[in-house]
Image (cartoon, rainbow, N blue to C red):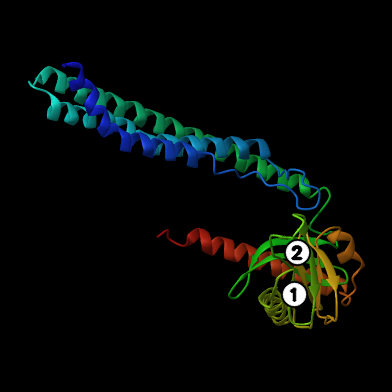
């Protein structure tokens, strides 16, 4: 039966089809949208609409880059199968398979070029929105304001998540994410007990978060003292968003909180007092370190 010569080569396309299905499934695994652990509302940042469009553009780039080779190989694989099952060779048919693969290669190349250009435009738009957003933030957080916050400040061996400078001291805020345990009744158990050297979660305990927070706090205190020439009150804060923190016998050098209403808690905390000269010197030193480390990372060659 002649029609079997065209049907049987489809067997060779099954591995390609299975790979294409895996690619389509993996495309939906990436979702950069995050929700607050406090009220489950979606978190939005400056340029969030462009961030969403950029995520979709990267998903399209992934899809075209992964599906392109699969689709372009399909005519060639089918043609090789036809050569095995065909009783006679028609060179015009083989040329047709080759031409079809060539056209598909050109098509996906054009789609990839389009995706790259789209991502480039979106990144430029996002950079502009972020720059304007940072300038607007100075309306409510001017550099001369007594409360200044730094994010992702480089330390000696680790990056400090957040550093808040207030008139009453400097706070190093480290954030740790942990998944709540599930109880026998199927409900989440999100209560953690704080001890001097460890955190007791439901079913396990950890010492590293407190140890690491104290380590970066000591480093920042020593570094600031060396920069401004006088001791600076620095207090470590460990935030566990989404957890109900039960304070046990804790040491006063570290504050463990859930993160909810963190701004009010830091405003009410009084680890010391900074005079205006020390306050301004601390902010200038932190600004200089953040700018210096950023310029060094930009100047470092990519590997």
Near-viewer residue (87 or 47): 87
**Residue 206 placement (x, y as % from top left):** 68, 75
- Residue 120 visible in the current orientation: no
User: Is the residue 32 above or below the residue 105 in the image?
Assistant: below
Q: Quadrant of the C terminus?
A: bottom left
Q: Residue at x 51, y 58 (%)?
A: 298
- Name the residue beneath numbered marker 1: 199
- Name the residue beneath numbered marker 2: 240
Q: Residue at x 90, y 73 (%)?
A: 270
**Residue 143 placement (x, y as % from top left):** 79, 58
CB contact under 8 Å: marks 2 and 1: yes
Name the side, left or right, on which 86 lies relative to 258. left
How far apart marks 2 and 1 lie (CA) works out to 11 Å
Q: Quadrant of residue 176?
A: bottom right
Name the side, left or right, on which 278 lies relative to 19. right
Q: Residues within 10 Å of mark 2 (few under 14, many from 20)?
A: many
Q: Quadrant of residue 73?
A: top left
User: Is the residue 16 above or below the residue 228 in the image?
Assistant: above
User: Is the residue 281 above or below the residue 95 in the image?
Assistant: below
- Residue 296 visible in the current orientation: yes
Q: Residue furthest right?
A: 268
Name the side, left or right, on which 237 lies relative to 301. right
| Discs 2/1, front | 1
Sequence-first tag of 2 and 1: 1
**Residue 108 placement (x, y as % from top left):** 36, 30
């Amino acid at each position: 039966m002649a029609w079997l010569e065209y049907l049987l080569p489809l067997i060779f396309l099954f591995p390609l089809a299975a790979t294409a299905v895996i690619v389509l499934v993996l495309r939906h695994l990436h979702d950069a949208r995050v929700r607050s652990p406090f009220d489950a509302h979606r978190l939005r940042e400056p340029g969030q609409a462009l961030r969403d469009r950029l995520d979709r553009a990267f998903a399209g780039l992934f899809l075209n880059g992964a599906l392109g080779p699969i689709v372009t190989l399909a005519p060639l694989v089918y043609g090789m199968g036809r050569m095995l099952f065909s009783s006679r060779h028609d060179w015009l048919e083989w040329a047709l398979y080759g031409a079809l693969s060539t056209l598909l290669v050109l098509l996906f190349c054009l789609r990839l070029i389009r995706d790259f250009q789209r991502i480039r435009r979106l990144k430029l738009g996002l950079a502009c929105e972020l720059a304007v957003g940072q300038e607007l933030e100075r309306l409510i957080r001017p550099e001369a304001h007594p409360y200044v916050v730094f994010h992702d400040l480089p330390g000696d061996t680790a990056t400090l998540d957040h550093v808040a400078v207030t008139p009453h001291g400097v706070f190093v805020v480290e954030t740790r994410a942990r998944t709540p345990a599930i109880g026998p009744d199927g409900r989440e158990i999100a209560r953690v007990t704080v001890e001097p050297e460890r955190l007791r979660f439901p079913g396990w305990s950890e010492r590293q978060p407190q140890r690491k927070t104290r380590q970066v706090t000591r480093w920042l205190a020593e570094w600031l003292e060396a920069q401004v020439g006088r001791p600076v009150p620095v207090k470590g804060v460990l935030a566990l968003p989404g957890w109900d923190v039960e304070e046990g016998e804790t040491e006063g050098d570290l504050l463990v909180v859930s993160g909810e209403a963190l701004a009010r808690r830091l405003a009410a905390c009084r680890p010391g007092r900074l005079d205006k000269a020390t306050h301004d010197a601390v902010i200038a030193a932190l600004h200089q370190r953040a700018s210096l480390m950023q310029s060094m990372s930009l100047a470092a060659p990519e590997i």
